[in-house]
Amino acid sequence: MTDQPHNPKLDEHPGSNTEKDPSDWVSGGEPMTGAQASYLTTLSEEAGETPPPEDLTKADASKRIDELKGALGR
């Protein structure tokens, strides 16, 4: 092994330094953005569902967008 400082990007276990759950992301608890809200509303309407509440967090909005995209086959 070399005497170089540890570099997390070269970790032997890729992904071990990242959070897999969006709710654990630093920005995950922040309110969703206007763009997220608009896209989520559009997807909800296309899926025939009630538009989401405006107080969703970024993480919840992102998760719901993924769910709707899957349901719509995108």
Image (cartoon, grey):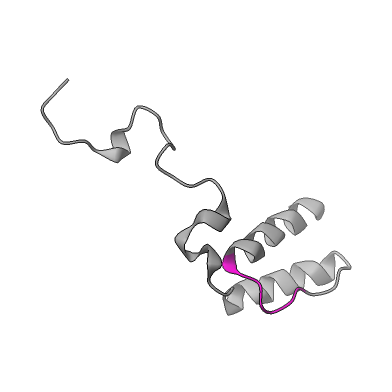
User: Is 9 above or below relative to 70?
Assistant: above
Q: Can residue 14 be spotted in the picture?
A: yes
Queried whether the magenta region covers residue 47, the answer comes back as: no
User: Is 38 above or below relative to 11?
Assistant: below
Residue under the point 65% across and 63% down: 60
36 or 7, which lies in front?
7
Queried whether the magenta region covers residue 57, the answer comes back as: yes
Q: Residue furthest top?
A: 1
Q: Quadrant of the N terminus?
A: top left
Q: Left or right of 25: which side holds 67? A: right
The percent position of residue 16, horizontal first and vertical second, equals 42, 36
The percent position of residue 63, horizontal first and vertical second, equals 66, 57
The percent position of residue 52, horizontal first and vertical second, equals 76, 73
Q: What span is in magenta?
A: 52-58
Q: Main secondary structure of the magenta part?
A: loop
Q: Can residue 73 be spotted in the picture?
A: no
Q: Left or right of 44: which side holds 26? A: left
Residue under the point 29% across and 33% down: 10
Q: Quadrant of residue 43?
A: bottom right
Residue under the point 85% across and 64% down: 47
Residue under the point 57% across and 49% down: 21
